[in-house]
Amino acid sequence: MPLESLKKLYPAANRSRYAIGQFNVNNLEFVQAAIEAATEAKAPIILAASTSAIKYAGIDYLMAMVRAGAAKAPVPVVLHLDHGATFEDARNCVDAGFTSVMIDGSHLPFDKNIELTARVVEYAHAHGVSVEGELGRLGGIEDEVSVDAKDAHLTDPAQAVEFARKTGVDALAVAVGTSHGAYKFKGEARLDFERISLIKKMTEMPLVLHGASGVPESLTQKIAKYGGRLPGAKGLPDDAYRKAVESGINKINIDTDLRLTFVAEVRQVLAENPQEIDPRKILGPARQAIKEIIKSKITLLGSAGRA
Ligand code: PGH
Ligand code: CA
Ligand code: ZN
């Protein structure tokens, strides 16, 4: 199928309370793994490229690879810009053929975030491309000492309503206690599910959870076994996905878990086969393992069988 606009996939996810997985891709193996996983799980899928991934791979290579994969996939495939920083980032992706873009003005003052996001919405919508905005700053709840401090970085529900109305975004990324990378929580994992429910109730919008990797111990231990070192790495327990989806999340972003999977597999192959020099024998097992972890995430999010 041709690439699908995310806008078309949200209503069913919002109505039937499931989340579509967003998986970050940088190269051929990740693109193939994601599209094969979605095909096998019969799920809609979002492939995402950050501005640094675009810089690394080249926007034309990324477009061509994802289009080639989507063309033969029997499930909807979206190509989405992850964390666009400027209007130009978003416009470049719209012009190249991305079917969804995120504009992340979350670090800006509220009115400037609205202004930037609305400008991207105007351009993207004119081209049939959906837009995700972000409100609040990602970061752990356990670091906060007071309610005031917590309110200062987590998404404010009343502001979310105003933001949605004034920008016309198709989806809203919320800050509810997660953060990017392999070190999300110092102690117990804490997410503000009540805040998600309240924002959902007040906005009735598709909501997005960033920083949603699980960072499973099985992966960090495997990395450690083969010479890597990630002490204190911690992510979301499986149960948090279910609760987040029940509370109103419709899109869940996963990057770190794919990186961990890739590194664990490559390290194992190299450690166990010191004479191996065939890149296909080194990257092939990683591609297979990434496909499997994406399939397991799709099942957790409830989007298996929805395509
Ligand atoms: C993410 C990915 N991308 O936008 O939010 O988060 O680091 O938890 O995979 P992770
Ligand atoms: Ca941000
Ligand atoms: Zn993110």
Image (cartoon, grey):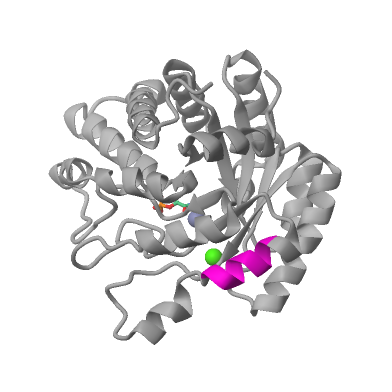
Give residue 276's position: percent from left, percent from top: 28, 25
Judged left or right of residue 123, residue 288 is: left
Give residue 72's position: percent from left, percent from top: 61, 13
Q: Please say whether residue 49 is one of the residues in the magenta stretch.
A: no
Q: Please say whether residue 158 is one of the residues in the magenta stretch.
A: yes
Q: Residue at x 73, y 53 (%)?
A: 90
Which residue occupies the foreground of this view, 72 or 228? 72
Q: Quadrant of residue 128?
A: top right
Which residue occupies the foreground of this view, 179 or 18? 18
Give residue 107's position: percent from left, percent from top: 58, 74
Judged left or right of residue 151, residue 127 is: right
Give residue 183's position: percent from left, percent from top: 29, 61
Q: Residue furthest front?
A: 201
**Residue 178 appears in the figure:** no
The magenta segment: 157-164
Q: Quadrant of the N terminus?
A: top right
Q: Quadrant of the C terminus?
A: top right
Q: Residue at x 35, y 23 (%)?
A: 288
